[in-house]
Amino acid sequence: QVQLVESGGGLVQAGGSLRLSCAASRSTFNYYGMGWFRQAPGKEREFVAAISGSGLSTYYADSVKGRFTVSIDNAENTAYLQMNSLKTEDTAVYYCAVPTRATPGRGLRANECDYWGQGTQVTVSS
């Protein structure tokens, strides 16, 4: 079992930045990589970004490419999502996850991840 704890969400104005963190209870990301998802009210959970275990390969949804950056610090068992140039449509609950059933990639699906964080709210105001 792996516990994931997210932090860093909050309220920010459009155009602003936030950095989300995802801390794992034990060494996990270096083997599986990890992914970030988000879910807005009334919508399905959607893929945001993913990173390989080495940290050398990253993948992004088209809607966030060029604005968000995913990274991992395997020594600290922590992953990050740097979010810049935030838009109101980025408002959602953000989740980190460990893809135990697939390798990280742009097509990563929620049902390919067995471990999830509790979610952190990101609200972008206009």
Image: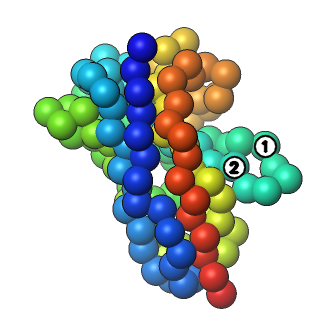
Placement of 39 over or under 32, stated as above or below: below
Which residue occupies 50% across, 37% down? 117
> What number of labels is visible?
2
Q: Nearer the viewer, residue 69 or 116?
A: 116
Residue projecting furthest to the left = 75
Q: Which residue is mark 2?
A: 39
Element type at marker 1? loop
Element type at marker 2? strand
Q: CB of mark 2 within 8 Å of CB of mark 1?
A: yes
Work out whether residue 27 can be spotted: yes
Horizontal side of 21 relative to 10 (left or right) equals: left
Q: Nearer the viewer, residue 122 or 61?
A: 122
Which residue occupies 69% across, 49% down? 39
Placement of 73 over or under 1, stated as above or below: below
Which residue occupies 28% across, 39% down? 78
State the image coordinates of residue 74 (x, y, percent, origin top left): 20, 32
Q: Which residue is mark 1?
A: 44
State the image coordinates of residue 93 (x, y, percent, origin top left): 62, 54
Q: Quadrant of the C terminus?
A: bottom right
Q: Earlier in the sequence, mark 2 or mark 1?
A: 2
